[in-house]
Amino acid sequence: MTQATHPDDLLIIGGGIGGLTLALMLERAGLRPFVFEAAAEIKPIGVGINLLPHAMKELSALGLEAEIARRGIATREAAFFNRFGQLIYREPLGRAAGYDWPQISIHRGDLHLVLLKACRNALGPERVLTGWQCVKVEQDEAGAIAHFVETASGKSLPSQRGRAAVGCDGIHSVLRKQFFPDEGEPHYTGINMWRGVTRWPPILSGATMTRAGWFNAAKLVIYPIRDGIDAEGRQLTNWLVEVATDKYKPRRDWNRPGRLEDFIGIVEDWHFDWLDAPAFFRAADVILEYPMVDQEPLPRWSFGRATLLGDAAHPMVPRGSNGAGQAILDCRALAECLTTHKDDAVAALRDYEARRRIAAANVVLTNRKNPPDAILREVYERTGDKPFARIEDVISAAELQALSDRYKRVAGYDKAALAAKG
């Protein structure tokens, strides 16, 4: 028997990373969240995700750091290479860089299950419902009313009333389409991406976020997400291959299968002393394909007692570990605003939008022009895509650090600023 919502409940539409994190934050603040997920069963799908210190700060405050760290890998360093395997720049990450919180790389499915278990324990299983597909949200002066159908059958389910409704329903958000029915097509960045996981011996330190090359040939991103997965001591290693691709139809499906033959020829001769790239990709357990697309920032997120969060509010290219990270920052801001305005949900959602909309839009737009690996672009352009004798003859260490630090400030995980927030 489904528990009926109460007028004081907060209706969370979507049980992904954003929706579950928000539910935990609201419950901890003494509020009454209810999660409605369209999938009939929440399963561990997808590939890797990287949780930066600003995201781990919030998840640690929820008491989840130990379990997340147990399932993932604490990333200790970033290493940047050109497509010839030459080291450009190396910097420490997470606690190794002096942050108070770690940077953890983990399988998205593992993170999702950690959050799901925590939600069911904190809220009770009756407050995390699966198979509930939201079709519309209405509102009146007293609250928000969400209308649902059963995902499997399409049959109507009881409408639910609460103080407010939050659309955490991802890139294909029903609430976003309701608010902006005439929104244009996704913005394609000119880059197509293949991603996957491979069981492989530790690369470099075994806790390195590795980036190599640039889009005009190919750019690789590689990092481990599970340690010691077999008797051989291999890791489950997440990877991305990004290639400049013109006139690509932006079909957005995180679980769309990809084909090795569509990109392997570009990296066929990428044999480095730290990685045999073609052998690594041929050993992949799974390959997925996704166009690097985002959406133009919205003029508003909140409409009375309904608002958007995470990918529903600000779809961005999966670059710089910002999809989940920015969603988690949304959760913190919204939880604080709903706590401050306990008796005025409309004011809470308005303040939440004021705190987060411009900041998230800046990340979306920065990812288009100056991504977190702009270091690779700078070296590619200065060398004319040729090997170098000494990196110091191409770019100074101070310039490299400045490029890295600039992105941290935009994305909200600059060390000094994060520490100052307490």
Image (cartoon, rainbow, N blue to C red):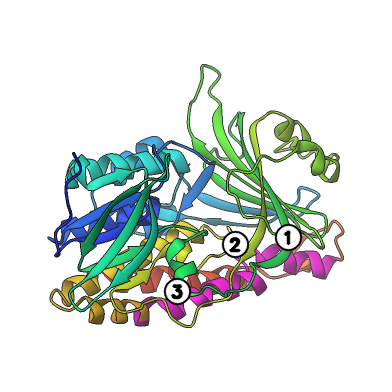
Q: Is 273 inside the magenta-drawn segment? A: no
Q: Name the element at disc 2.
A: loop
Q: Give me the C-alpha separation between circle 2 and circle 3.
A: 22 Å
Q: Where residue 191 is drawn, which disc sits there?
A: 1
Q: Where is residue 418 in the image (x, y as percent from the top left)?
A: 36, 69
What amino acid type should be assigned to the residue bearing mark 3?
Phe
Q: In this view, does 202 lie above or below 322?
A: above
Q: Give me the C-alpha separation between circle 1 and circle 2.
A: 10 Å
Looking at the image, is mark 1 or mark 3 earlier in the sequence?
3
Q: Is residue 210 above or below residue 91?
A: above
**Residue 313 visible:** no
The residue most toward the front is: 155
Q: Please tell me how crowded label 3 is: few (under 14), some (14-19), or many (20+) other residues with Cα within 10 Å.
A: some
Q: Nearer the viewer, mark 2 or mark 3?
A: 3
Q: Residue drawn 85% across and 56% down?
A: 387
Q: Name the element at disc 1.
A: strand
Quadrant hosting residue 249: bottom right
Horizontal side, residue 68 vs residue 26: left or right: right
Residue carrying label 2: 317
Q: Give the range drawn in magenta.
A: 354-383
Q: Quadrant of the C terminus?
A: bottom left
Horizontal side, residue 224 vs residue 259: left or right: left
**Residue 314 visible:** yes
Q: Nearer the viewer, residue 171 or 105?
A: 171
Q: Nearer the viewer, residue 348 or 361?
A: 348
What amino acid type should be assigned to the residue bearing mark 1?
Ile
Q: Please tell me how crowded label 1 is: few (under 14), some (14-19), or many (20+) other residues with Cα within 10 Å.
A: many
Looking at the image, is mark 2 or mark 3 earlier in the sequence?
3
Label 1–label 2 contact, CB within 8 A: yes
Residue carrying label 3: 179
